[in-house]
Image (cartoon, rainbow, N blue to C red):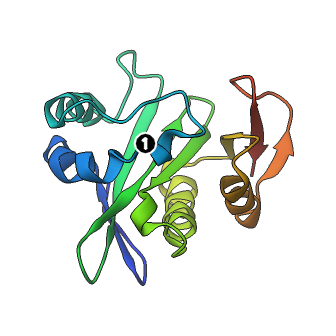
Amino acid sequence: MRRLVTARLDLEPLMRTHAREMFAALSDPAIYLYTDEAPPVSVAALAERYAKLESRHSRDGSELWLNWVVREASSHEVAGFVQATVMANRSAYVAFVIAPSQQRKGYAREATDVMIRELRETYGAKSLLANVDRRNVASIALVKSLGFEEIPGADRPGDQLYEA
């Protein structure tokens, strides 16, 4: 897994050492309005989670877990993360989380776009999928701007599945 770069962002492969600065970025409850998750409970708990993700694959090896910390290039400030789970059939579920203080700057789109290129070129992803809460207008607009189209089959009630 390699570092990805855009004009404004650096995407670093997620490591447990990112836990402290990511904890601050992920602690705002507004991030979790449209998810069934909650803010991390501690830096230590987040570091433990990240340590598991550092393996870059599921325990049985059937999934690749690709996670990048999104960092603003000029200030080096953490903005959030993008992630993908690549399945054996080369479909990939993608997701993005940008801290509220960094939203409305186009970072989610820019970071997700470069991740998608990496998924296709390096990991051979054929089908890209995104589960989005039907109430999350901003995320729906973002995935549509990246060429995703609505399809049946969301994983959770209240979500809509998109494919590109």
Vertical position of residue 40 compared to residue 25: above or below:
above
Residue 54 position in % (x across, y down): 25, 37
Q: Nearer the viewer, residue 83 or 26?
A: 26
**Which quarter of the figure has residue 145?**
bottom right
Vertical position of residue 15 compared to residue 64: above or below:
below
Residue ID at (52%, 63%): 108
Vertical position of residue 67 compared to residue 109: above or below:
above
Residue 139 position in % (x across, y down): 66, 54
141 displayed left or right of 112? right
**Which quarter of the figure has residue 138?**
bottom right
Q: What is the total number of numbered labels drawn onto the structure image?
A: 1
Residue ID at (63%, 31%): 89
- For label 1, the residue is 29
Give the amino acid type for the residue marked by disc 1 in the picture.
Pro
Residue at the front extreme of this rendering: 29
Q: Which of 33 and 4 is in front in this view?
A: 33
Q: Nearer the viewer, residue 21 or 89?
A: 21
54 displayed left or right of 11? left
2 displayed left or right of 125? left
Other residues around mark 1 within 10 Å, as few (<14) / some (14–19) / many (≥20): few
What secondary structure is marked by label 1? helix
Residue 92 position in % (x across, y down): 59, 40
**Which quarter of the figure has residue 23?**
top left
Residue ID at (74%, 52%): 164
Residue 106 position in % (x across, y down): 55, 73
Vertical position of residue 101 compared to residue 9: above or below:
above
Residue at the top extreme of this rendering: 60
